[in-house]
Amino acid sequence: MCQHVLRVAICSCLIWFQSANSQEDQRDSSFIRFVPGQERWSGELQTAIVSYQNNFGVTVNLVSAVHLADVDYYAALNDYFLSQDAVLYELVANADERPTSDAEITNVSAISYMQRALGNFLNISFQLEQIDYSSKNFVHADLNPEQLSKIMNEKNQNFFSMFLNLAVSQQMAEQATIEAGAKPSSLNMMSILKALVMEDRAISFKYLFAQELGRSDGLVFSPEVESGLIILGDRNLAAINVLGNVLEDSAAKFITIFYGAAHMPGIERSLIARFGFKKNEKRWVTAWEIP
């Protein structure tokens, strides 16, 4: 039970839900990976920046995010965002409500509280406190609280059932990957006990969680399953609709979609099928460096 709760918490690091009130050659569509180091308890958790182009010379970059990471990771992203004409970002909030690094954030969700607690334990930073959302090129591309509430009512769901559906779908996807020959999760009671007896628990747990986050990229939900998950499918649709507006109404040539890595397979499908973009290149950036 404990390890299952931890896996859901780790999965939440790939899915941003804050309210203002695998190997590269095996999966070309990988958006997050773990690269083990030479020493024990060492390695890097890396996220992808994948570029796509259309016939009109427009470039869309999918910038995968983990919502807890090293300060240098967020600093590098802030510099990168300055080069973009538009940055479409995820945040369940009203479009005019932008987080600021020096503001006291109140009324945080339970999932946000869990992420913050995990970040404090692992000595890594929280995305809302590091990313500069005040930039003029930032464009809100997510549901607002009223829209989210309406969709939840229409689908007869609440916050508990929404995350329960995510956990069940995650478990089913994980079982499917194991049956297909993938290695089972290394986050188990034995590895947790080993981490607990280490002199520096933060490093050992950071390693285990990074390993699990990298492995989670192999858990790809089908379009049918994704569409039934409000936290993924409906929010991906919101991002894609905003992208359509930006493509139609602006002269932006370099556009970034900045979303949690778990959203990216679905966003990529829509980017290619709906708008006719073709994948161009991919590069990796280090989000967590261990130790």
Image (cartoon, rainbow, N blue to C red):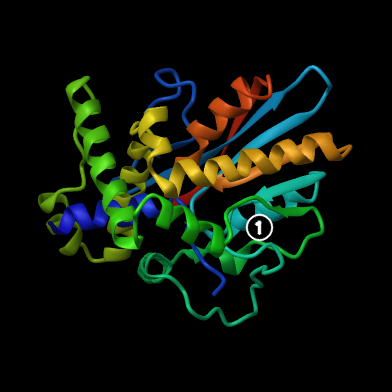
**Rendered location of residue 152, percent (x, y):** 42, 55
Q: Point out the image quarter for the C terminus.
A: bottom left
Residue 162 placement (x, y as % from top left): 34, 54
Q: Residue at x 43, y 36 (%)?
A: 227
Q: Is residue 221 visible?
A: no
- At label 1, counting other C-alpha atoms closer than 10 Å, the crowd grade (few under 14, some 14-19, many 20 or more) is few
Q: Outermost residue toward the right?
A: 251
* Residue 258 versus residue 92 in the image, above or below: above
Q: Quadrant of residue 282?
A: top right
Q: Quadrant of the N terminus?
A: bottom left
| The quadrant where residue 177 appears | top left
- Which residue shows up at 15% across the image and 59% down it? 2
Asked whether, in this view, residue 212 is left or right of residue 242, the answer is left
Q: Residue furthest front?
A: 154
What residue type is disc 1 on? Answer: Ala
Report which residue position mark 1 lands on. Answer: 75
Of residues 142 and 16, which is closer to you in this image? 142
Q: Position of residue 193 (x, y in %)?
A: 12, 58
Left/right placement of residue 54 relative to residue 162 reads right
Q: Residue 99, relative to residue 76: is it above or below?
A: below
Q: Nearer the viewer, residue 266 or 103?
A: 266
Position above or below: 8 against 120: above
Q: Residue at x 37, y 70 (%)?
A: 110
Task: Give the residue displayed 70% in from the left and 55% down from the top.
Answer: 78
Q: Secondary structure at mark 1?
A: helix
Q: Nearer the viewer, residue 39 or 133?
A: 133
